[in-house]
Amino acid sequence: MAKILLINPMVREEDVPRHVPYGMALLASIAMREGHQVQVYDHNAWRKGADMLEQVCTADDWDVIATGGITTAYGSIKEIVSIAQRICPRAVVMLGGGVLTSLPRDMMTWLHPVDVGAVGEAFETFPEMLTAVDQAKAAVEAAVEATGDGSPNALFKHTIDWSAIAGTVSRDAQGELKFSAERKLIEDLDTLPYPAWELFPLEEVYFPNSQVLYSEEGMQASRRLDINGSYGCSMICRYCYHLGIAGDMRYTEDDEGKTQVEFDKPGTYTRSIRYHSPEYIVNLAKYAQERFDINFVAFLDENLMTMNRASGGTWLPEICRLWKEKGLQPDYLREGRERTEDWTGVLWSGTSHATLVDKDILADMREAGCSYLIYGYESFSPHVMKTVGKGASPTTNERSFFWTLESGIRPLPNQIIGFPVEDFDSIRQNMAAWDKLGIQSKPFIATPYPGSEWFTVYRDRLIEQYGGDLEAFILALGDATSATGVISENFNAVELLGLRELMVARDYRGIDAYEKVWRKHHNIAEGEPSTLVKKPKPKTRLKVAS
C-alpha cells in the first residue's frame, strides 16, 4: 500500500495555529481505512520553515506527497509543492481543497510541480487516486522483476491515466491540462469515518491554543476540537465561496473547447444541503471527549440554522437532546448553578443566521451547552444588505442579536465594509447600529475570494489592481482584514481603511469632514446622494434547488 505524506500548509501567519485541518484529518482517516501508510507534517502548527519541510520530504521513500487548503494558503502551498518535487521526484505530488477547486486551470498552470489535483469534494476521489498509485507502482515493480531492466524506483507516476478517475485534473504528455468527469457529491455524510485527529500535534500546539476571545467560557476553553456537522449553505452571499461542496460547481467548455470550472454567476444558483445525522455528530463529540478529554467543540458549519431549517426544525433540537443524553451537557447547566473551576462536560459554539433563528432553539442550545454564536451581519444598512444576497435586514439583525443575548448565548457580530454600493450613509448606519446594540466591531473589508460571485463579476478589475497579474492577487489574499482587492464603487483602499478607523473610533465628526472633501473631489453637491452608483432595488426572493 502507498506511503503517503500529507502536509498542512501555513495559513493566518499573523495568529497562532488554532484549528486542526478538518478536511485533511478526514482524508487521512479515509486513507488509513483503505490500508495505506499515512504520515502528517503540520507545517501550520510547527512553522519551522523550508529546512524542516526538506527534512520531512527526505524522511521516507514517499509514494504520494499531498497538500491543499483554502486560497489564502496559496503562498505556502507553492513552496511545499516546489520542495516536494525537488526532494522527492519519484513521489506523486497531489493538490486539493478550495485553493485548487476555485481556480483549477490557473493553479495547475502556476504550480508546475503538481502532478494531479482533486477538484471538488475529495472523499471518494482521493482513495481512488491512491489505488491508481498502488496499481501503477505494482506494475512497474513487476516489470522490473520480470525483465531485470530498470529500477523499482522508476517514475511510475508517469504511467497513471488520471482521466479515468472522476474529479481530477492532470497533464497529458504534451503538458496540456486534462479534466476528467465531474465528481458528484456524496449523499450520505455519515459514511465518513471520524477525523484522524491523533496525527496532529494536539497536546503540543492545538490544545494550548484552544482559547477563543468570543465569550467568557470560550476564553477559558483548554481542550478544544472542531467538528463539521454539515456541508453547504442555502444562502447566495455574493462574497462567499462554498468550496465546491454546496452544489454550486459546474463544468463548462469555453469557446476553444477547454473545460472550465465555474461557480455562482448572477442569476444562476444551485445549492445542495447536506448534513450529518445528530447521532453521528454527538457520537463524534463523545468519542473526542473520551479519547482526547476535550471540554469545548467549535462547529465549523457555514450556518447551523440553514441545516435546522432544511431538516424541518428537528436537527438542532435533536443534537441538543442527544448532547444531554450522552452526558456531554456541562454539569453546571444541568444542575442550574454557577460555573466553577471543576465543572465537567463539553461546551460548544457555532454559527447562526438572523432570519432563521428563533427563541425556542436558542433556549435549547444554551441548555445543552452552547456558549456563543457567530452572526454574519455584514451590514446594518438596508441598501447594502439588498445587494449581499443573504435575505437579512437591519431589523432581523437586531432582533437575533437581542434574542441570542437574552438566551444566555453570546452573539458575535461579523461586519464588512467596502461592498460595491458602500457609501457615507451606510457607514453611519453601521455606526448607529453599534451604538444602539452597545457593541464594538472592527469590520472586515469586502474581499471577492475566487469562487465567489463577486470574484466572477469583478475579476478584470482585480487583475488590473495587480498590474495584470492574477497570481499576485492570490498571493496577497489574507483574512479580509486588509484591502487586498477593492470592489467598492465609491471608495478606494486608502479611503476604506481610513473610514474603518474612524468608524471604530466613533468619529462622526471626522467622517462628516471627509465626506465634504470626497464630495468636492467627485463634484457631488451637498444634499445629493453620497454615492457614485444607483442604490439597488429589491430583488425577487431566490428559489434554491436542493
Image (tube, grey):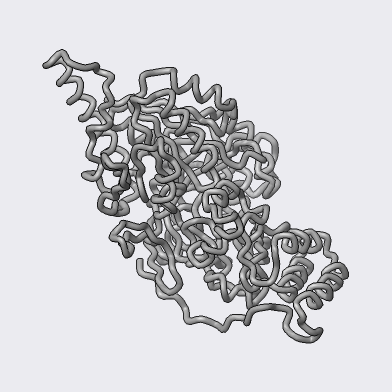
Left or right, 438 with reference to 150: right
Residue 173 image position (x, y, % from top left) = 26, 39
Compared to residue 318, the image places residue 226 above or below, namely above
Q: Nearer the viewer, residue 473 or 527?
A: 473
Residue 339 visible here: yes
Compared to residue 138, the image places residue 301 above or below, namely below
Residue shown at 79% from the left, 67% from the top: 435
Residue 296 image position (x, y, % from top left) = 57, 41
- Which residue is farthest left? 146
Q: Nearer the viewer, residue 158 or 193?
A: 158
Q: Residue 425, located in which quarter of the rendered image?
A: bottom right
Left or right, 351 with reference to 341: left
Residue 365 image position (x, y, % from top left) = 55, 55
Left or right, 427 with reference to 184: right
Residue shown at 29% from the left, 51% from the top: 183
Q: Nearer the viewer, residue 526 or 195?
A: 526
Residue 299 visible here: no
Residue shown at 72% from the left, 83% from the top: 529
